[in-house]
Image (cartoon, rainbow, N blue to C red):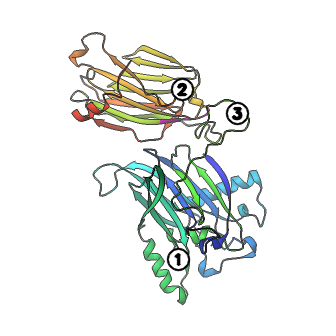
Amino acid sequence: MINTHHKIPYVAYDQCMLRPGQKHQGNFGFIFERPGNLLCDMLLICYPGQLSGNNTLNGLVTSIPYRMAKHEANPISRLCAEKRKEHCEVNGCTAGKAPFHIWHGIMLSSKYEKPDGFNESIFTTTIKLSFTNKEYILNKTSLFAIELGDKNHFATRVREMTKEVKNGKVRLVPGDIIRMNDGRELSEKFYEHVNIGAYLHNYTGIWTLGLDMLPTTGQRTLNLFVYKGCSCGLEAWFKMPTTPPSLVPEIINIKPAGYQGYDWGKLYHDKDCQIRHTDKTTYPLGNITDGELLVNFTLWTSSKGKNGTIEVFHGTESIIQLYANATMITHKFKGKIVKEFPQPVNMLEKGVTLFASFRLTKYYVWSGFSSNLWGSEFVVNKYWHDTKWWDGQLFKGNGSNTLEIFGDFVTVTPVFIRTLNYDDIKNVRNDFKSY
């Protein structure tokens, strides 16, 4: 798990008025992006809860009507409590300092699943909060913002975002507000009853996130404690009211101090995720004798990996096996070693991504791979029977067809499996050329 303590300079009035020379009034908030087909096991953001009665930072205590209820059993509350304890054991937490106070949190995760009302699997993003047991789900949304209020209101809103290219430049474009279950209903009810003594904890939802996260006017720092799971490809950025609204956030890769060489980047030298491991996992492939099958997925290695295996079976018979260790990548076809590729650099201890693709037919199989360790090259190999391959007997007979994956890596995308039609075969033909 990647963990980082961010101390962000904070001026509350930036959300209400422009600074000299500033043209656009923005807001405090987050931008989240799930690139490509990446999944996310967990992205946890903890912070000192401003609406906790235990938070006495700067000598201020939130009055009772505006406090959050205690949710000790809430899983996000428990996670942030555990992370706070770990942080304090290492760094020490003293009274009056931000880490000393009760932490609240928000957690995001992304899956590829078939929700109710959908006929096929889609990407979903789930948002959970420490101060409510409600879950908020985004369907088919890969780029969005969580806006922590603005100069006209203090309700948190979720907004869909897009990127567009104009005059050769990429810009961020705000889209529609995403209605999050009962968020608007709860905020409106609270506004209606606040003058007659409404208690905020009866109306909490995602709309109250900004109220609880953003410090008071007397505080000058926003403290965020970020914990990213080792199978999470979701990216997050914090934006300020002074951030140009069309500015596209970028990933900044910082070369490790003292590191010699150029093979470094976002995924390299991952000190917090030294172990990524997948127990033996089986995926049914279905029928291969009536058509060609395409299987695609992406693996993410760790920094202490030793070996890993990808294998396609027909019943109990191994059709193709790819095995990697620290020094060699070995290909086996029908149980026999057919190719060996020496590894000058052990990809299992570099924290790299590896895209794998199999094209399976009753005559022969292709395997294709690319990695950010090697560059953009897509390496393809083709294997078939030594005799009478044209009879199409490779996957014929009793037994189901399966894919098995296990070793020192995780699947950071879904395993996509689909039967190719005639047009698909023409489209992938150029990719699957073996030399």
Identify the residue at image location x=52%, y=43%.
231
Residue 421 in view of the camera:
no
Name the spot of residue 32 as percent of width and height, x first. 51, 55
Horizontal placement of 43 versus 426: left or right? right
User: Type of residue at label 1?
Assistant: His
Count neighbours of disc 3 (C-alpha within 10 A) and say few if under 14, some if 14 to 19, many if 20 or more.
Answer: few
Labels 1 and 3 touching (C-beta < 8 A): no
Residue 206 in view of the camera:
yes
- Front one among 172 and 203: 172
- Residue 259, labelled with which disc? 3
Count neighbours of disc 1 (C-alpha within 10 A) and say few if under 14, some if 14 to 19, many if 20 or more.
Answer: few
Residue 407 is one of the magenta-drawn residues: no
Q: Quadrant of the N terminus?
A: top right
* Depicted 23 relative to depicted 65: above or below: above
Total tally of numbered discs in the picture: 3
Q: Which residues are magenta?
A: 299-303
Residue receiving disc 1: 153
**Mark in front: 1 vs 2:** 1
Q: Mark 2 or mark 3: which comes first in sequence?
A: 3
Name the spot of residue 65 as percent of width and height, x first. 60, 81
Secondary structure under the numbered disc 3 in the rendered image = loop
- Front one among 272 and 167: 167
Secondary structure under the numbered disc 2 in the rendered image = loop
Q: CA distance from mark 2 to mark 3?
A: 25 Å
Identify the residue at image location x=23%, y=26%.
289
User: Type of residue at label 2?
Assistant: Asn
* Depicted 340 relative to depicted 294: above or below: above
Secondary structure under the numbered disc 1 in the rendered image = strand
- Front one among 285 and 71: 285
Name the spot of residue 251 as percent of width and height, x first. 57, 47
Residue receiving disc 2: 307
**Most frequent secondary structure within the magenta stretch:** strand
